[in-house]
């Protein structure tokens, strides 16, 4: 293997590492959203005697936060998909 090929392999490895890091971050984000979603789902079960108006406000805030997280994750997934396709194209081009 010559120096050019070794550098190319190293670059591809680094790109794969970056993709893995992005996937790990997305997994953490998904876990965070699941916690918020579960809390929302169980809110009425935990506080049945509480003031309904206050519960409604809290649920609305939590829902808004959850939707913001979902939108952010959607953008991150789209960016990751573009990066993966670009990496695949570069790899195919370099192998030909």
Image: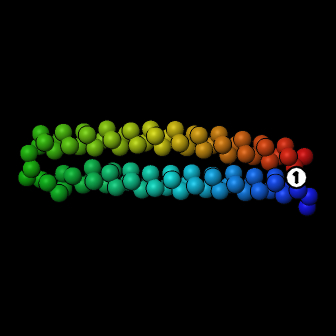
Circle 1: element type:
helix
From the viewer's perspective, tell me whether residue 41 is left or right of residue 94.
left
The front one of 10 and 43 is 10
Residue drawn at x 81%, y 52% as measured from the top left: 8
Determine the residue positioned at 16% across, 44% down: 55
In x, y percent, where is residue 58? 20, 43
Asked whether 79 or 47 is in front, the reply is 79
Quadrant of residue 67 within the rendered picture? top left
Crowd around label 1: few <14 · some 14–19 · many ≥20 (10 Å): few
Q: Is residue 56 left or right of residue 36?
A: left
Specify whether 53 is left or right of 21: left
Name the residue at the front extreme: 3
Location of residue 27 in the rendering, given as x and y in whole percent from the top left corner: 49, 55
Quarter of the image with the N terminus in it: bottom right
Q: Residue at x 84, y 58 (%)?
A: 6
Q: Is residue 59 above or below residue 10?
A: above
* Residue to which mark 1 is pinned: 4
Vertical placement of 29 versus 64: above or below?
A: below
The answer to which of 50 and 86 lies nearer the viewer is 86
Question: Percent x, y for residue 62?
Answer: 28, 44
């Amino acid at each position: 293997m010559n120096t050019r090929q070794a550098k190319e392999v190293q670059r591809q490895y680094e790109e794969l590492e970056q993709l893995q890091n992005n996937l790990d971050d997305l997994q953490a984000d998904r876990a965070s959203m699941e916690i918020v979603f579960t809390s929302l789902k169980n809110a009425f079960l935990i506080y049945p005697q509480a003031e309904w108006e206050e519960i409604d406000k809290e649920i609305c805030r939590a829902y808004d936060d959850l939707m913001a997280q979902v939108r952010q994750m959607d953008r991150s997934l789209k960016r990751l998909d573009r990066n993966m396709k670009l990496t695949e194209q570069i790899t195919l081009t370099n192998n030909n």
